[in-house]
Image (cartoon, rainbow, N blue to C red):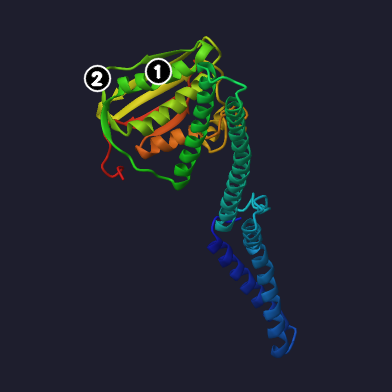
Amino acid sequence: MFRSIKMELSVLIVIATAIAFALAWHFLKWGWSGWIAMPLTLAVALGITYGFAHGLTAPLRQMRKAADAMADGDYSIRVDHIEDSRDEIGQLARAFNAMAAELEHADQMRRDMIANVSHELRTPVSALQAQVENMADGVVEPTPANLESILNQTHRLADLIAFLLDMSRVEAGAASLEIETFDFAQFLDETIEPLELADGGHGHDIHLQAPTGIMVEGDPNRLRQLFTNIIGNALKHSADNTTVLIEVTAKEQHNQIITHVINFGSQIPRGARNDIFRRYVKGTGKPGTGSGGTGLGLSIARWAAGLHGGSIQVVDDPRGTNFEVVLPMHIDDSIVK
C-alpha cells in the first residue's frame, strides 16, 4: 500500500501495539491475572508482527533463492508477486527481474554466438582446406581465379576474427583512442568506397551530402568501424537498385557533427529500436548469424561512438530507417585515454 518500507514498518508497529494494548486492557478488565494476560498479549502481538513481516520479506527470500540459482547458471528464475508492490523491496525485486532477464538474454545470445561463429568459421576453413589440398595434389591448377577464391575465403576469416576482437574490446568496455584531425567529408568518401565495391551487383547508390572543409577530431579507425557498420547495415536492409542517403550537418556552436544514414526501406518499430544495438542481436530482432553476420555490428558502432562521447539512435523519418550519429567535432581531453 505504501511507497516506503519505513512507513509499512511504522504502521505494523502501531497496529501491533494497538492490538496488544486492547487485548491487555480486555484481559485485565475480565479479571485475568497479569501473569496470564501479558504473555498472551505478547504472543498475539508477536504473531501479528511475524505474519506481516513474513509477507514483507517474501521477495527478499525469493531473491536469495534466485541468486543461488543464477550462481549455478540458471537465469530463468524470477521473483513473483511483485507487480503491486510499491515499496523499496518491490522496486528492488523488479530491478532484480530486469537484471535476470538481461543476463538470461546475454547468456542465450552468447551460446548462439558461439554456435554460429563456429559454423561460420568452419565454412571458409573447410573451403580453404579443400582448395589447398587440391592444389597440393595437382588436381587444381593455381590459376588467378582459384587464388582469388582462396583470397576471398581468407578475407572472410579475417572479418570474423576482427569481429571477435571487437567483441572482446566491447566486453572490456573501453579502448584507447588515437586522436587525429581530418576532413569529415573526405573521411566518409574513403569509408564509402570499399562498401560500394563490396556491394557488387546489388545496384545500391550511396549518396553523400556533406559540407566540405569541416575538420573533425577523432580516431579515424574507430570511426571507420562505426560508419562501415552503420552504412553496411543500411545496404543490407535496402532493396536492390535503391539509394542509401548520408546527410551530414555541422553545428559548430554546439560542438556537434550530426550524420543521418537513411535507407528507404521498412521502418524499425519503436519497441525494437534500442534492442538492435544489443550484442548478438541482428537488425531483425533475431539472434544469430544466419546471413553471415555476427549480431555485433551495431553494438560495436554504438561502442565506438561512446568512446568519442557521441551517440547513435534510430529517429523518426517518413522516408525510411534513419540512423542518427552525433559526434563531437572537438574531443574533450577527459575522453582520451
The residue nearer to you, when weighing 114 against 28, is 114
Residue at image point 70% right, 84% down:
39
Indicate the amino acid at tag 2.
Gly
**From what the image shows, is residue 102 above or below residue 295?**
below
Q: Is mark 2 on a helix, strand or loop?
A: loop
**From what the image shows, is residue 288 above or below residue 72?**
above
At label 2, counting other C-alpha atoms closer than 10 Å, the crowd grade (few under 14, some 14-19, many 20 or more) is: few
User: In which quarter of the view is residue 17 placed?
Assistant: bottom right
At label 1, counting other C-alpha atoms closer than 10 Å, the crowd grade (few under 14, some 14-19, many 20 or more) is: few
**From what the image shows, is residue 133 above or below residue 23?**
above
Q: Is residue 287 visible?
A: no
Q: What element carries label 1?
A: helix
The residue nearer to you, when weighing 85 against 293, is 293
**From what the image shows, is residue 168 above or below residue 3?**
above
Nearer-N-terminus badge (1/2): 1
Residue topped by disc 1: 193
The x, y position of residue 53, in whole percent, is 64, 67
The x, y position of residue 325, in whole percent, is 40, 28
Residue topped by disc 2: 213
Residue at image point 38% right, 15% down:
208
Q: Can residue 132 be seen in this view?
A: yes
Indicate the amino acid at tag 1.
Glu
Q: In this view, does 84 lie to the left or right of 170?
A: right
